[in-house]
Image (cartoon, grey):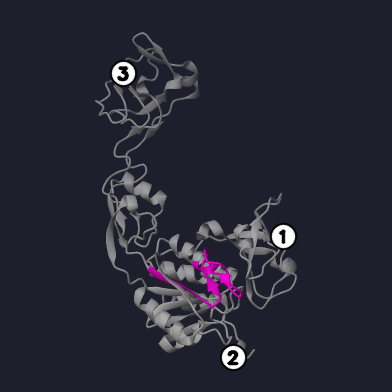
Amino acid sequence: MDKKTSLTSVSAARQQIMSSARCMLTAQSVPLFHARGRVLSEPVVSLVNVPPADNSAMDGYAMRVEDLNLDIIPVSQRIAAGQVPHTLKAQTCARVFTGAEVPENTELVVIQEDIEIVDGGVRIRSSALEQGQKWGQFIRPSGQDVVEGQLVCEAGVKLEARHLGVLASMGVEHVNVYRPLKVAIASTGSELVNPGQALKPGQIYNSNRFLLAGLVDQLGMELVDMGIITDEQSTTETALALAADSADIIITSGGVSEGEEDHVKAAVTTLGQLDVWKLAIKPGKPLAFGSVKQTPFFGLPGNPASVLVTFMVMARPFLLALQGCTNTNGHSLSAHLVNPPKKPSIRQEYLRVRLVPSAQAGLTLEAMTNQNSGVLTTAMKGDGLAVVKANTCGDEAQDVEFLPYASYGV
């Protein structure tokens, strides 16, 4: 295969691209309430135990093990959540409610369903005594969830709702995070118009602008919308230079092939350098990566399905690395593809697939009928991408890697 038509493998291209990813962002303090989607710039260590004190996991009665066999156990105090208990006296119990701090000397909680209320106190039902009452039951000990001094979140963690809940339980009010990455997006093509305008002959609506805007937004990054770049060399160079001055990274769609009206590749070479071009990926072969005035640049293909695939596989992990994330990979799962390609491809294929019910163990996928790179509805109606290795087909291509859209924010 000659140099002109040689293709870089997906793994080699990803390794080369990711090797240049560096987070250069400044840090800022933000309220925890507004921190979802932000990336920690420093680790978070707990200053408290969670929970701060032993508390009851159920509504019931706090008592000592040695008092279980008393016929009647007097109730010496009543403790609701938020109240401070007194030390539990010998041969008594305390009425406690879920979440309430248990008194000092408490060794177990007997749930209220196992208790009879009688004159002078309570009696444990014989059936409950026969089943056994264990030391420590229904008590959530101090530090059960988080221990004082524990490293809870490392720098580089992208905060989601589950993280916010844990940090709030520790009393964290503000967190130090990186400022949002500024991502400039532009769509190339004189034929493009935005929705809301009437189409003239030869024009199409610009779907890639909205696709890329959504993909960037769900990553918690700041969008810099550069609009549409028409198919002229000078216009393309001017727009890319402005984008480089306005953002931390540039992502364009279209204009990276070898046609006479494809000017992006030449403009990037003029303003910076092109490091990667033409991948052994299907769809998305004419992907370009380099820099414009030292600002990282991704040139994605023009077809919308190609934009989706190359963003998920190549651009997304690079963006997350620039944002300071230590985990840049989406989830991938092993799956079975019921209708693999009948012919092999020299490129690694990313098929739009849907999950299908199956009696066999594991995930089962079905490739959508139309895999044309200009068709995006098959992604909208599907559940993810199935990765078919290059030069495989038929039975050999049935065991695949599954990339669920939900894990990639698609």
Query: How much space separates mark 1 and mark 2, taking CA atoms?
Result: 36 Å
The kind of residue tagged 1 is: Val
Q: Secondary structure at mark 1?
A: loop
Query: How much space separates mark 3 and mark 2, taking CA atoms?
Result: 87 Å
**Residue that carries the numbered disc 1 in the rendered image:** 338
Q: Position of residue 334 (x, y in %)?
A: 61, 60
Of labels 1 and 3, earlier in sequence is 3
| CB-based contact (under 8 Å), mark 3 and mark 2 | no
Identify the residue at horizontal 41%, vertical 83% (top origin): 238
Asked if 317 appears above or below 94 in the picture, the reply is: below
The kind of residue tagged 2 is: Lys
Magenta region, residue range: 182-209
Q: Secondary structure at mark 2?
A: helix
Crowd rating for badge 1 (residues with CA inside 10 Å; few <14, some 14–19, many 20+): some
Q: Position of residue 286 (x, y in %)?
A: 57, 79
Image disc number at residue 3: 2
The kind of residue tagged 3 is: Thr
Q: Position of residue 376 (x, y in %)?
A: 61, 64
Image disc number at residue 92: 3
Q: Quadrant of residue 62?
A: top left
Q: Secondary structure at mark 3?
A: loop
Image disc number at residue 307: none
